[in-house]
Image (cartoon, rainbow, N blue to C red):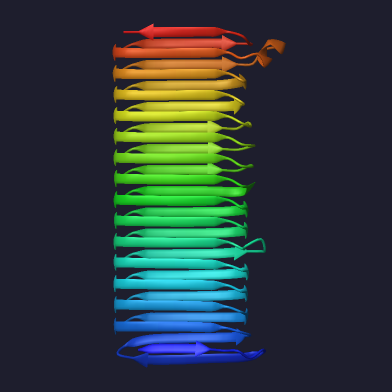
Amino acid sequence: MKFKVALLAAAVAFSAQAVAGENEARINQSGLGNTADAFQTGTGNELTAQQSHLLNDAKSVQKGQYNKAKVMQSGIHASADIYQAGYKNESRMDQSGFDDRAKSVQKGQYNTSDIEQDGMLDDGVRADVYQAGYANTSRIEQSGSGNDAVSVQKGQYNESDVTQSGYRNTADIYQAGYANLSKVKQGGGYGNDVVSVQKGQYNESRVTQSGIKASADVYQAGYANKSRIEQASYKNNADIVQKGEFNESRLSQTGKMNMADIYQAGHGNDSLIEQYRENSATVVQKGTYNESDILQDGLHDVADVFQAGYGNEARIAQSASGLGSLMTNTASIAQHGYNNNASIHQSGGANGATVYQY
């Protein structure tokens, strides 16, 4: 069945319903320049599209059986594209505002995509979803202006969730494998950016950003790795790379212009970084069950931890105290071998400490 409506007259309301081969399409349009295209083949496919006001556009192509697509648009110059092939895929889009755009492509079985957008001017908000496989789930919710989100999932039981509010935030998620989870929350800020890539099984990535021009990049490959990033204030930067199994990292940046990098390869490594303002921290863990904690509560401090082996523990604490805090503290711990333990505590400024353990 092919159903096409082109409406080019102002202040005209149009509604249509078509059923053939057990497929069903309903389209309601009101306004000027609305266009709706629906192509369905197979059995039990459904489409519901409702458009209002000016220059809305909706397209839906469904091939296979029992796929569903629902598009609700209200505003000026909204656009939605849905393509589904396979069995029992569902996609729903709600758009309200100015110049919204949404795309959803699903291939396979039992995939679900849900997009809600509420944007204004400045290029509106944009969302793109691609899912291939079995029972993948993607949800994107955007409000504000100029936000952009992309979600690509391949495999089985992967889950992606993006929530954006504010101005010109971007989020990109790529997941391949089985039961990976990625959640991004960007709220009330400007120009924040997140990239999350996960390959393997049961990996979990969570990123929360509020503030201005924060950047977070996560790469996970393996089994059951976990990472969490929280960023606030201004121009914070965080990078996490995890390879192996059961590695865990937590990173918090609450002041401005902090930089943090975590690299984990192996099994059961654990890393924690907390930063306040204009600090820099780097952690590299290779091996099994290594643990690292870095706490930076001062200004312009630098901390580095390198661990290779089994069961090593490293802790660095840098805190502010008096006018000396304006000067840089530096701390470095390098551990090789088994069950080494090192701790550095610095208060004030211009302190330096280096620990090597073999």
Snapshot quadrant of residue 343 = top left
Quarter of the image with the N terminus in it: bottom left
Q: Residue furthest right?
A: 323
* Position of 90 relative to 157 (above/below): below
* Position of 199 relative to 7 (above/below): above
Identified at 46% across, 29% down, the residue is 261
Residue 162 percent coordinates (x, y): 49, 54
Q: How many marks?
A: 0
Identified at 45% across, 91% down, the residue is 17
Residue 45 percent coordinates (x, y): 34, 80
In depth, the one of 31 and 89 nearer the eye is 31
In the figure, is residue 259 to the left or right of 289?
Answer: right
Snapshot quadrant of residue 124 = bottom right
Residue 63 percent coordinates (x, y): 31, 77
In the figure, is residue 73 to the left or right of 271?
Answer: right
Q: Is residue 242 visible?
A: yes
Q: Is residue 87 visible?
A: no
Residue 294 percent coordinates (x, y): 49, 21
